[in-house]
Amino acid sequence: MIVNLKNLKSVLKTKISEYEMLNKSLLEMIEKNSTKDALDLIRKEINETQNYINNLQSDIEVMTKQENDTKNEAKKSFYNEIKKPTLARSIKMKTAKDGLNKCNANFYDSIKKSDFAPYDTPYNSIKKEEDKPKKQYPSIQPYNDVMFSNRFLVRFDNDVKLPEWYVRKVNFYLVGKELDISICDCLIERDGKKRPIITEFTNLFAPFRISIDHLDPTGVVLYTERYHGCKVIEIIKGGLDYANDDMATIDLRIMYSDVTYETAH
């Protein structure tokens, strides 16, 4: 039988399985209070199997190193042979070089004989690319009345003390007359005491109003949406996660009775 690296790895895998089974049998015998002689016998088998596994691993390491060294030597020899100049390769390279020179000579001769080349060299009559007139494109004027999804301010009326910059996102459901507003979970000051912002909405029973200002890129208000008769119908407090370093959020589902639009001009 020819011993190679693949055979050794297969034997090693079998011996490791045998070693695990012996250890499992030893634990079962200890639980059943087997005799000392029986325990000593299985411990001996475990030690012999462990030594056999260690020897196999050493042999595998040695054979792996020898195999890698052999591959590296073969690659090195192969590349050295490629680098050596041969007569056939030299002839091919010279033939290819001569053919390229002949093609270049024919190209220059054809340009010299053409109508647009009055000089001896072919490049004197060829106009450079940068000398050609560049195409002029009309300038694009900015659209000052276009809305941007990240240019807005959400303002609650005086019953809710929430700064505008604590609002992160707004989603609109015009058919159902509902809004989804995502805010940062934070502390606010009410009556001289700091309280969680969620208490502003859990204790809010009277209808209130929300105003959303849409801004241009310079911060000027283009128009304002005013939602009247607003009531909080659902509050979803964001979870906590050690693997996430984003700000904690609270999602509000708000139903309103009417909406009006006011332009700034």
Image (tube, rainbow, N blue to C red):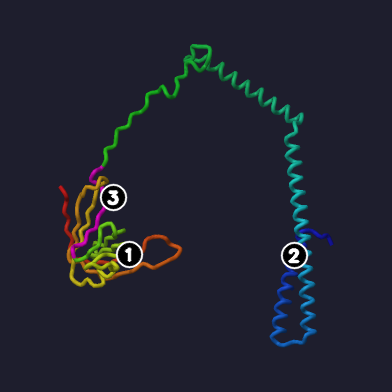
Determine the residue positioned at 71% across, 74% down: 20
Asked if the residue under mark 3 is in contact with the one under mark 1, i.e. CB atoms within 8 Å, the reply is no
Mark 1 or 3, nearer chain start: 3
Q: Which residue is mark 2?
A: 10
Q: Which residue is mark 3?
A: 148
At mark 1, the secondary structure is loop
At mark 2, the secondary structure is helix
Q: Position of residue 123 (x, y in %)?
A: 50, 18
Q: Is residue 40 above or below residue 1?
A: below
- Span highlighted in magenta in the image: 143-158
Horizontal relation, residue 96 to residue 263: left or right: right
- The foreground one among 135 and 215 is 215
Q: Quadrant of residue 108?
A: top right
Q: Quadrant of the N terminus?
A: bottom right
Q: Quadrant of residue 130?
A: top left
Determine the residue positioned at 29% across, 59% down: 166
Does the segment drawn in magenta span residue 155? yes
- The foreground one among 122 and 188 is 188
Horizontal relation, residue 129 to residue 6: left or right: left
Determine the residue positioned at 76% across, 52% down: 67
Q: What amino acid is found at the position of numbered circle 1 in the picture?
A: Asp
Q: Separation of disc 2 and disc 3 at Cα? A: 65 Å
Q: Separation of disc 1 and disc 2 at Cα? A: 59 Å
